[in-house]
Image: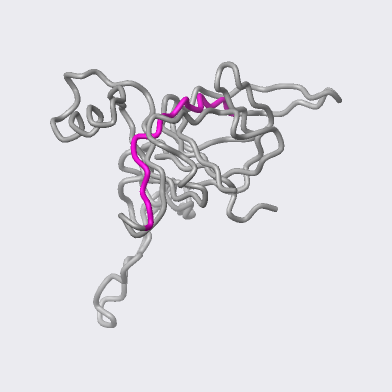
Amino acid sequence: MKKAILAQKIGMTQIFNEDGVLTPVTVLQAGPCVVTQVKTMEKDGYEAVQVGFMDKRETLVNSPDRGKFDKAEIPYKRFVREFRLDNASEYSVKDEIKAEIFEAGDKIDVSAISKGKGYQGAIKRFGQHRGPMKHGSKYHRHAGSNGSASDPSRVFKGKHMPGHMGAKRVTVQNLEVVRVDAEDNLILVKGAVPGPRKALVEIRNAVKAQ
């Protein structure tokens, strides 16, 4: 059965297991999420569950969203995402999805917007080598030749060049759930999770579980 939930990244810490082994973990505030809409095969052509996460002030909600939430009689939510689930028909509007749907040992995929690094050179952005640093060299951190002059007389698409780095959707697969605090809706994930603190994180079952 597929499971999914929205979470907010709290930060990183470390815990010890029963054998005294230290494990670095990322703490995620997972839910509670409320079901705002259920997509059905008859009406929409596919099955999915639309969920809302974190309350939002009424003054920040536009008219279309306000009408949608008012119709469902649900408090205004800051984030709304859709998950395609095999058991979508089992959900109904106003149902809550909490962290307890996951348990220790589960393999998950997490998606989030990575940290933005701004405008960066090719060395930091793609790991290219630098030039000689000794006196007299005028080639240190430049990207180097971009293309031949006569043939092909152009720069190929995909050429590694300086530019905007980060701030992209990143998915990390096969992370392990170390601990679940159902009372406080916390999920502790082994290792790092993309994004800065307070970033929105989408958690799903691992599609390539090992």
* Residue in the foreground of this view, choosing between 1 and 42: 42
Q: Quadrant of residue 38?
A: top left
Locate residue 202, reporting x and y percent: 46, 39
Dominant secondary structure (helix, strand or loop) of the stretch shown in magenta? strand
Locate residue 1, reporting x and y percent: 60, 48
Q: Quadrant of residue 63?
A: top left
* Residue in the foreground of this view, choosing between 69 and 172: 69
What segment is highlighted magenta in the picture?
26-41
Q: Is residue 184 left or right of residue 190?
A: left
Locate residue 46, reporting x and y percent: 38, 57
In the picture as drawn, the residue positioned furthest to the right comes out as 19
> With respect to residue 205, does 8 lie above or below?
above
* Residue in the foreground of this view, choosing between 141 and 54: 54
* Residue displayed at 51% across by 28% down: 30
* Residue displayed at 47% across by 55% down: 128
Q: Quadrant of residue 120?
A: top left
Q: Is residue 66 left or right of residue 182?
A: left
